[in-house]
Amino acid sequence: MSEATRAAEGVPAYEFRAPPTILFGPGRIADLGATVASLGSSAWIVAGARALGAAGGSDGVVAALAAAGVTATLVGTAGGEPTVADVVGLLARQSAAPREGVVVVAIGGGSTIDLAKALAGLVTNLAADESDLDAAVVDRLEGVGRGLPLREPVLPLVAVPTTAGTGAEATRNAVISCPRRGFKRSLRSPFLVPRAAVVDPALTVTCDRGTTVAAGLDCITQLVESFISRFAQPLPRALVLGALPGAIAALPQAVADPRDLAARAALSHGALVSGMALANSGLGMAHGVAAALGVECGAAHGAACAALLPVAVRVNRQVAEPHLARLERAIDPGAPAADAAAAAAFGARIESLCVAVGAPARLRDFGLRRDRVGWLAANSGGASMRGNPVQLAAADLVPILEAIY
């Protein structure tokens, strides 16, 4: 048997989903009109308030689309992580509107893109007799309703991220929370992968320090967790090895000089790759706990990931040692040859990075009460936790979380 044959037999079967069109680089916002026009004749814009300003303002975006022959309407704005109520309100406004030729355009951070995905996915999948929109939304979220799938094709979506963190422009899910019911779950379908991602790093230069840090560490957490996930696939791993070194080097630079476009570009590229990686390989403990922390305390997702990434690396280091060592060697070609030493160096690198950019480090920093640590452990489950290299029951998580309280 040849070496090539043996190598081929060592590659597991996999699938890979990503946006069919990715336009990346400073100035690519100028291509938004032509991109949308290739998919339809009118646009429903969902945007974040700051995001529209970064992209040229509402009038500027509408004019750019009009110049490409696309009629555009601002149909919704995102004020934070989308809730069931936000989705219901948007559906109530748009479900009766004509949909022929409509493209949903999301301009904003991950929360905005998730809200736009929910609109694009659900507006074509509601049954005629589903008058209770609240129940209709919940019934299509993982783990809380009836688990109804999206069966009908969704409206085409063009995602324009204005932060460099979630990678939502490349994922197949939308994260939706419900403070009243106390959950944060995903609407998930291959249909939800955006048809196009227009990634312009120049749109991120107006992000404040807190957003830059939280988004950047969310991106880095996703790159690391997808690489060591139990379900990691070879193509996402190859992409992570190329993107992680630049993202880790760029985050302190972007914090020190918010207008450093090279640093912003490295973070935007890292976020895009992290979205493709998590969509195809899954995540791990940091994201599993961060979701529950968001429900309990309203913690910003990226900030929660920042607090949990160092401990997740420590918890998984022994099991994921060869993979963590590969990450360290991708960053530092002079890293130790022994996996144990290289993995330890990577853990130290992550801890130093979090300290250097002033990331939160303790659960109490988010307002969590000590007597709620047990609740946090019990509710840190879901798809993310299933991918963690070390399988952790709630009882296993309690002492881990107590240690960082």
Image (tube, rainbow, N blue to C red):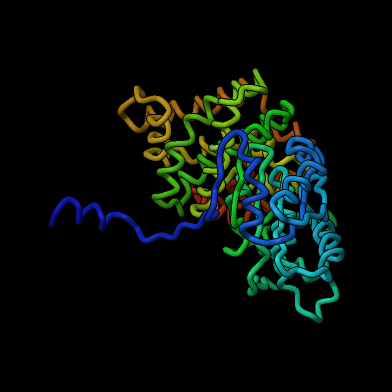
Query: Which residue is farthest left?
Result: 1
Quadrant where the C terminus is found in the figure? top right
Image quadrant where residue 371 sits: top right
275 sits to left or right of 242: right
| Horizontal relation, residue 78 to residue 330: left or right | right
Q: Which percent across, then down, holds residue 357?
A: 64, 23
Q: 311 or 140, which lies in front? A: 140
- Of the 4 image quadrants, the one containing the N terminus is bottom left
Rendering quarter of residue 99: bottom right
Closest to the observer: 10 or 193?
193
Give the vertical position of 27 relative to 230 (above or below): above
Q: Which residue is located at x 38 percent, y 29 percent?
A: 342
Residue that sits furthest to the top in the current view: 256
Q: Quadrant of residue 338?
A: top left
Judge whether residue 281 can be spotted in this image. yes
Seen at 42% across and 45% down, the residue is 237
Q: Where is 324 relative to 375, above or below?
A: above
The residue drawn where x is 54% and y is 52% is 21
Residue 205: x %, y % from top left: 68, 28
